[in-house]
Image (tube, rainbow, N blue to C red):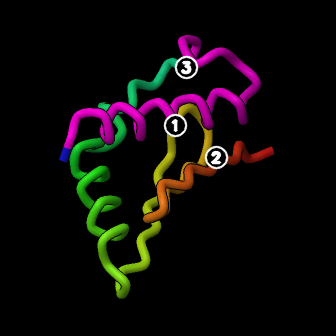
Amino acid sequence: MTPDIVDTLCWNIVTTVADERGIEPERIDDRLYDVLDVESLARLVEQAQRSDSMDLSVSFRMAGCFVTVTGDRTVRASAPS
């Protein structure tokens, strides 16, 4: 696993959460590494991309949003109303 994959995944998560909340990424109070192990998540995503039989979806809460990351590196965030 390359650091670029971890960095890209982190950036995608943080910016998706910031977009959902309508704020700049640096204004997010939660630190992603306090919420989950990003290296482990990146390894799972890489495994899912290499596998025809693995369908990955990981969900967690961050900065008041429900966040889901899928095996194709799609990141979705939704803030409950």
Residue 39: name its quadrant. Answer: top left
Mark 1 to mark 2: distance in Å?
Answer: 11 Å
Which label is found at residue 28?
3
Mark 1 to mark 3: distance in Å?
Answer: 14 Å
What is the magenta range? Answer: 2-27
Which label is found at residue 80?
none
Looking at this view, name the residue that lies furthest to the right.
Answer: 81
Give the labeled residue for mark 2. Answer: 77
Label 2, secondary structure: give it.
strand
Residue 9: name its quadrant. Answer: top left
Residue type highlighted by circle 3: Ile
Asked whether 13 falls inside the magenta stretch, the response is yes
Residue type highlighted by circle 1: Asn
Give the labeled residue for mark 1. Answer: 12
Residue at (34, 70) in percent of width and height = 48
Q: Compare marks 3 and 2 and give the one earlier in the sequence.
A: 3
Residue 76 pos. (x, y %): 62, 51
Residue 81: name its quadrant. Answer: top right
Q: Nearer the viewer, residue 20 or 49?
A: 49
Q: Residues within 10 Å of mark 2 (few under 14, many from 20)?
A: many
